[in-house]
Amino acid sequence: MEAQIKEIIQRYNQDKSFLIPILQDVQKQFNYLPREALNQVSILLGVPLSQIYHVATFYKAFSLLPRGRHQLQLCLGTACHVRNAPLIEEHLERSLGIKAGETTADLEFTFETVNCLGACALGPILVADGEYYGQMTISKANKILKQLGKKVESDDE
Amino acid sequence: MNKIKSPDELLNLQEKIRSNRDPNKPAITICGGTGCLAYGAQKLIDNFFSEIAKRNLIGKIDIRATGCHGFCERGPLVVIKPQGIFYQRVKIDDAAEIIEKTILNGEVIEKFLYTDPRTGEKITYEHEVPFYKKQMRLVFGMNGQIDPKSLEDYLAIGGYNALVKVLTSMEPEIVIQEIIKSNLRGRGGGGFPAGWKWDATRKAKGYPKYVICNADEGDPGAYMDRSLLEGNPHSVLEGMIIGAYAIGANEGYIYVRNEYPLAVTNVSIAIEKAREIGLLGENILGSGFSFDIKINRGGGAFVCGESSALFASIEGRAGEPRAKYVHATDKGLYDKPTNLNNVETWANVPLIINKGADWYQTIGTENSKGTKIFSLVGKIKNTGLVEVPMGITLREIIFEIGGGIPKGRKFKAVQTGGPSGGCIPEQFLDMPVDFDELTKIGSMMGSGGMIVMDDRNCMVDVANYFLKFLEEESCGKCTPCREGILQMRKILDRITQGEGKEGDIDTLEWMGQAIIDGSLCALGSTAPNPVLSTIRYFRDEYEAHIKDKKCPAGVCKALITYSIDPETCTGCGVCARICPTQAATGEKKQVHNIDTAKCIKCGACFESCKFDAVKVK
């Protein structure tokens, strides 16, 4: 891990002001921010661990917990909200047995909500592993979960 | 490309690019904005390339993946040039047919044409589409003409001419005077005159000075800055270079949301190419002026759109705003004089320099000049980005450009200004839209989000939505904002759950005022607006929730019941199959029923019924 962190920090010439992009790259590498990685960043960059945690917990983009194999992001921007996105949110929470922002115990799914993806014509939008699915409905969401290997009890087929 | 060492050389290069291009050569432009890409436009673009390769037409037909054209509702969009034939809802596999019929045989394919819903007429050309007709696309219009990854494309349409003009014939002070005279105001929502800000930064003591582009577009439902940065990044860079020259800055930043990966990519490419050719870096075009730009990706915090929080974030700290008794123009990033403008503001600069402040003054209203890009979304037929002159009415935007409300439903309100704005009811639809007018009715123009709502949207629910958003996004520094929003949200939660009390509305009103008075930055001091404006215009809806325990729009779960209308139910069984709790049941081909005791009001049956037999009360 140390070598990987070193490489990332080198990319930014060990410049402390690039702490946020550095953490973004660390998260990209490990899928989340492991405690050990943050320790390394602190030592190699010369920034107190407390300050790193301040930043890592302040910004939404960072996760201190491992994330699932499949990432589901539901847009809850205003346009999606007025087009019934909250019903999809509740449905996904119910189907996966987790709250938004959490990861299933088997590390298969992480479900998050985001504030606006700016593709409002397609609202409500669900992004599954980077792929955009528009005009989301409960039955479409079921199909996507099924494709990703989730057992879904009811669907409309 | 070699480095360009003088303005003349740049003009020669432009001329060379133009003379190598045949304006009559057929070109297929495909919208590659985030919206169209989400529809699968990338595969369509790939198919166009492989289809022309198959037919040995490489070099004979140009294929251009452009930025967002704006008409997101009808994507993927394809425009055939030089004629300007407008195709919409094109499918991934349609590339071959378009090449065969339209490009090779000059035939217009009717099924891809847009039908004017009012007249039923098919429309062939892009400029005749009603959505575009009423717009004035001065800033955003270039998007459809250029490949954002190509510096040559930008140069071909006269890109960087404004920079040449500035470097060859305008002293920095003159540039600032021109911007002041144009009365360009900050497009991020604040509306502060950009020229004055430039002037203050230029006059401030201290070095280095910074210019920053704020691309932390956080208002949900607003995406014009992203589309500009994605679709025409050089126009933003050109504006920034001119600004830096005028202010006397040699370093710049673009602070862009990490949620906008395509914008980050395209602007990174643009910076690299501009640097390669000598439009950024040391001694730009041999003028002796040096300037370079770094990109900083945000970490997903709404408050970082606020200037002092944004500076903290660039410095690698948590984005907490500070008091503004010292202006950023004196002490901003790293406590040095800093000029921060938003994406759209910067993109207006080359236009003003090229055409002059006098010309710019002729567009717009008395105190709001130029155009504004709005993102028209929600319950609207033509979702998309529209650029209109300031002073146009809400009615023109929503009903003439936007085409009105889908499914024959009734307009209820339009929410402008994002979480800082308010909901505007029908009686104000003839208000002119500019920086000052909407403020008078308790909303604001803001950065340009316009979310249209119909009679199936609950105003209490919408107000609660914004409070939840702000509760999460409050940085927590000021107690009235951190705790006040939470308490207001709790009251609204109660109201939407049918537990509202007499006096709740009054409490919300005085609490809102206290938060406005007691918060440091604009997040807190505008946070109560969505609640206050909905109370102002939709008080009866609040009262229905509190007194009658009813949600007139049929949204608030605790106050509604689902039932099946026996007259319209065909017994198809879709509701029974999708119901997660087996509350909807019935024999095949017989009228179905919903057991209200089992129903969890998830809405699945309502949404999946093709016969509108499921009713909400």
Image: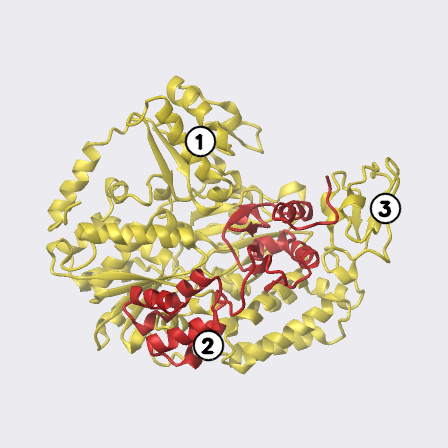
Chain colours: A red, B yellow
Q: Kindly report the distance in space between the C-alpha atoms of the residues bearing marks 1 and 2.
A: 52 Å
Amino acid type, label 3: Thr
Q: Quadrant of the C terminus of chain B?
A: bottom right
Other residues around mark 3 within 10 Å, as few (<14) / some (14–19) / many (≥20): some
Q: Nearer the viewer, mark 3 or mark 2?
A: 2
Q: Secondary structure at mark 2?
A: helix
Q: Kindly report the distance in space between the C-alpha atoms of the residues bearing marks 3 and 2.
A: 52 Å
Residue at image mark 3? B585
Q: Which residue is at 52% across, 58% downward?
A: B220
Label 2 resides on the chain identified as: A
Q: Nearer the viewer, mark 1 or mark 3?
A: 3
For residue A47, what is the image quadrant? Answer: bottom left
For residue A7, what is the image quadrant? Answer: bottom left
- Residue B86: numbered disc: 1
Label 3 resides on the chain identified as: B
Amino acid type, label 2: Tyr
Judging depth in this view, the residue of B544 and B590 nearest the camera is B590
Other residues around mark 2 within 10 Å, as few (<14) / some (14–19) / many (≥20): some
Coordinates of residue A32 in the picture (x, y in percent): 49, 65
- Residue A53: numbered disc: 2
Q: Which residue is at 83% across, 52% downward?
A: B583
The answer, for residue B57, to whether it is visible in the render is yes
